[in-house]
Image (cartoon, coloured by chain):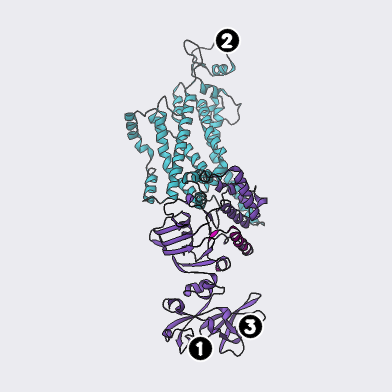
Chain colours: A purple, B cyan
Amino acid sequence: MAHIQLRNITKKFGEHTALRGLDLEIADGEFFVLLGQTGAGKTTTLRLIAGLEKPTEGQIFIDGVDVGDWGAAERDVALVLQQYSLYPRYTVRENLEFPLKPKLRRVEPAEIKERVARAARTLRIEHLLDRKTDRLSGGEMQRVSIGRAIVRKPRVFLMDEPLSALDAKLREALRTELKNLQMTLGATFLFVTHDQIEAMSMGDKIGVLDRGRLVQTGTPQEIYNNPRNTFVARSVGSPPMNLVEGRLVGGRAVVAPGNFELPLNGQVASAAEGRPLIFGIRPEDIFVEPGAPIAAMIHDVENHGVEKILTLVAGEATLRATVPARMNVAVDETVSFAWNPEKVLLFDSASGLSLRHAG
Amino acid sequence: MAAVRTSTERALNRLAIVCVLIVTLIFLAPIYWIASTAFKPRELATSVPPTVLFEPEITPFVKLFVRRSQLREPVAPEVYDEAPWWEKLVYDDGERLVRSGRTGEVQLSGYPDRFLNSLIVATISTILAVGMGTFTAYGFSRFKVKGESDLLFFILSTRMLPPIVVAIPMFLMYRAVGLNDTHAGLIILYTAFNLSFSVWLMKGFIDEIPREYEEAALVDGYTRMQAFFKIVLPEAATGIAATAVFCFITAWNEYAFALILTNREAQTAPPFIPSQVGSGLPDWTVIAAGTFLFLLPVAIFTFLLRNHLLRGMSFGAIRK
């Protein structure tokens, strides 16, 4: 188990800069999720820690030791990938034994046997041990590849979108399993994903990456309730946070395209008065009810069972709102809505930064 | 593929089969010609029109392996009766065996030695070309090599002129360094011929092997070399087999340089077989027998690797 620190990491591939001045700290035993789009530098970060790439600049510490000159083998980390993570031609058992066989590790045959058996039991793949890996289903494959990581008792588990090639149901099941596994092992996990649901549901901490920069780190609650900028606001939550342009006039939000006005709470910095802003409000903080101040037309209704997601058009602004499923609404119907003034976030319209973080 | 087929599709399918059959026949005709001539009695070999049905004989093969000369006068009946069956076959054709003066032992023709030379040269040069090619291709495929595309182009450019162009310089160089008529000389030459081809082909195959496999092994605690031998090599087996077949065929069939650079010790079969035309009247059946046996190793080698080849031919389409 280990504590990991990246200090001012920059990684360039030729002309392309994959990571810029990245600072990251992962505590011992933490489930850290790195969230970002394709090309944000998530996988690069993982590969740097694994020792498969060398940083152009910056240092990597594992348990306080600079591992810059260490090869992948010496770092004693485990890697689980989205695919191609199992050796073809080998049986499941051989795959599980493989990480224990290098001379470097010096594990006794009896111990290998025992550890493989224990890992197989933990992941419920005992019945698959003698099967060839090409005869496994996707979920079984990922179980085996997680097994390949846990047999070794590595210092850190690095997981590169291990669930994204699986179908939705399996993904959900394995999500819970992985989280439980991490808690049982008490291990340090660095989990990379583009799926905000995975990040929110599994992470002790989330780091949001945007084009090679770490935008924000925090607990899922912090990231959700208090995003540092509009990028983070858009990245988490489904549907994402509503972002509408407007101005602050006399402590009230004036939304530009539709020219509707709504109240804000007293939190607002007076310096923001009159400046172009972006107002952020989560769909669940928009209330659709008779007698509310603003009229809007229902453009679309998505029924999710427990709730409905409405797409509202007020003037030229489009807002999404979650309402209880029992509410009777229809497309093209006119309703009225309000928002929870406590929950409105203000972002600077030029930089996209949240005013809370800036000030 | 659709389960239901229209009649047009069925007709097209049959047409395709017919075309394949015709092409196969065209390709097989020369091989049939060689094989049948190898078993023909001497006088039928050059008959016009060609004889298709005949009683196969083994005489050409016997004659291929022994040194013989023309009979000036018919052999005495008691000598004929005492001779073993294979010697009778030679007498039947109006020839006799050449025996060494003192011991009276039957002398072998040059063919077995030449055949062995061919095997040695082709096998060793194939192993060298494919081995070095695989390592080189791995390096190009997995590491950042400065000027990679220029180097690869340079490697390929060695095949951009007909090899025979360099025959005379090669001959002079080989004579100067004493590589003329040696196995090593031919092996070096054929390895050099095949290396560029092998590098390019193997690079294609190795590029197809996901590097995640090796990286997983590296993270698991193996060295780069161990990862190469444990993971990459078994995965590249198909490509190696295909490349080896091509290299082996090239080295096995090479004629011009073998003719120029060797004469006795290291001569391979291709220049030797036609040189037999010169003794007495051309004996096409013996030449055909020599050629027929010469075809066999390549045929067997290719047959053994056919599963790999079929997959390997569709370069790059190893995995879905």
Q: Which mark is residue A261?
A: 1
Residue at image coords 34%, 31%: B174
- Which mark sits nearer the N-terminus, 1 or 3? 1
Whole-angstrom CA distance, mark 2 to mark 3, is: 116 Å
Q: Disc 3 marks which amino acid?
A: Ala
Give the magenta part as a residue range. Answer: A172-197
Q: Are marks 1 and 3 on the same chain?
A: yes
Q: Disc 2 marks which amino acid?
A: Pro
Q: What chain does mark 3 sit on?
A: A
Residue B182 visible, this angle: yes
Residue at image coords 57%, 10%: B77
Whole-angstrom CA distance, mark 1 to mark 3, is: 25 Å
Whole-angstrom CA distance, mark 2 to mark 1, is: 129 Å
Mark 1 touches mark 3? (CB < 8 Å): no
Taking depth in this image into account, of A37 and B72 the one nearest to the observer is A37
Residue at image coords 38%, 40%: B162
Res B307 → quadrant: top right
Closer mark to the observer between disc 2 and disc 3:
3
Q: What chain does mark 1 sit on?
A: A
Q: Residues within 10 Å of mark 1 (few under 14, many from 20)?
A: some
Residue B49 visible, this angle: no
Q: What chain does mark 2 sit on?
A: B
